[in-house]
Image (cartoon, rainbow, N blue to C red):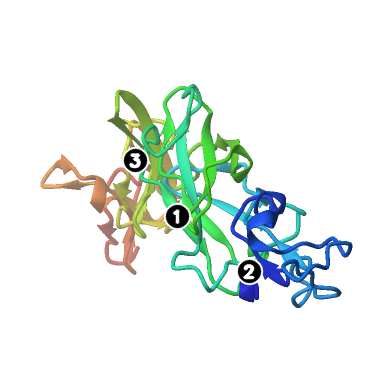
Amino acid sequence: AAGAAGGGAYVACHTFGNCAATTGLSRDKKHQRDSIFFLEGNTAMTYGNDLASGPLELALYQAEKQAVPGQGSLNFTFALLDSDLQVMLSPDTFALPFLVSASLCALDEEECSKTTSFQPDTFFFLPPGKSEASTTIFAAPIRYCEVGVNAIKVLLSVIGGGVQAISSLSKQFQITCLPCQAGQALQLTSTGGRHLWSCNPCGPNQYIVNTSDPTIGCQNCPVGADCLNGQLFGHVPGSEWEAIGSQYRLKSCPAGHSLVNSLDGLFSHDVQQCMPCAVNQYILSDLYACQDSTVGA
């Protein structure tokens, strides 16, 4: 019996014809000798024909074609097809399930494989009894892209389960590298002689001025601001902040507020805030401190 492999009977060969002579199985009704068997009307719960071969093709149904390196992932759904292009199930009678490996390589790499991949391969398996993987999201992290190149090469290969390395059990395609998004810092690294980049998110109370400059990192949020998703917003309505280099500087405060940006006479980024004057205080300019009102004023 084919069990969970699909079909009424299962042979491990990639094409059924190669194994028919040795297995004594045939779907041809003319051959009804004692040593030949055929299974009429048996579709194995609709998964496959009367007879099913080993996997012949990796069918890629859907795959994300763009990602932010360090933040995004390769999401895809696939199925394994037998020699009659019927969807297979991963056989529960095998010691190893069918595995799909994902290798990510530079665009100019002549042959993408686990030895040329600039990050460790990711593996996914089709559990016994599962058919096409459309009910499950398979995600391979996209950790890096190459500096100066806006795409990477992806190779998906079927391994395990006793399958042979044949070209129809591999799929190769490209993924577009998206730039760092708001609240993400660009970081550079090198491996195998290649210069790579990735995006790392700022902390929950941090901001970043420029997401495309690797020399600018995430900054702590000043006292007088709120930082959400890597962006800075002033606490006090009407306060103005200006980006200078890698930091925001508090430029001005609304009426009735004093601009605070120093400790012991020295500029301090983290203490910047618009401090409201107290009751019975006044201020001539936000560049000065609040003053007590005179008697009768």
Q: Which mark is residue 5?
A: 2
Residue 284 placement (x, y as % from top left): 35, 47
What whole-number distance in Å separates the C-alpha atoms at marks 3 and 2? 65 Å
**In this view, which residue lies farthest toward the left?**
264
Q: Nearer the viewer, mark 3 or mark 2?
A: 2
Say which quarter of the image contains residue 215. Answer: top left
Q: Is residue 43 above or below residue 212?
A: below
Q: Is residue 151 above or below residue 277?
A: above
The residue lying toward the viewer, choosing from 196 and 2, is 2
Label 3 crowd (10 A; few <14 / some 14-19 / many >=20): some
Label 2 crowd (10 A; few <14 / some 14-19 / many >=20): many
What whole-number distance in Å separates the C-alpha atoms at marks 3 and 1? 47 Å
What whole-number distance in Å separates the C-alpha atoms at marks 1 and 2? 20 Å
Q: Which mark is residue 123?
A: 1
Q: Amino acid at mark 3?
A: Arg
Residue 60 placement (x, y as % from top left): 67, 49
- Can residue 79 be seen here? The reply is no
Asked whether, in this view, residue 12 is left or right of residue 7, the answer is left
> Quick one: label 3 or label 1, which is nearer the N terminus?
1
The residue lying toward the viewer, choosing from 64 and 134, is 134
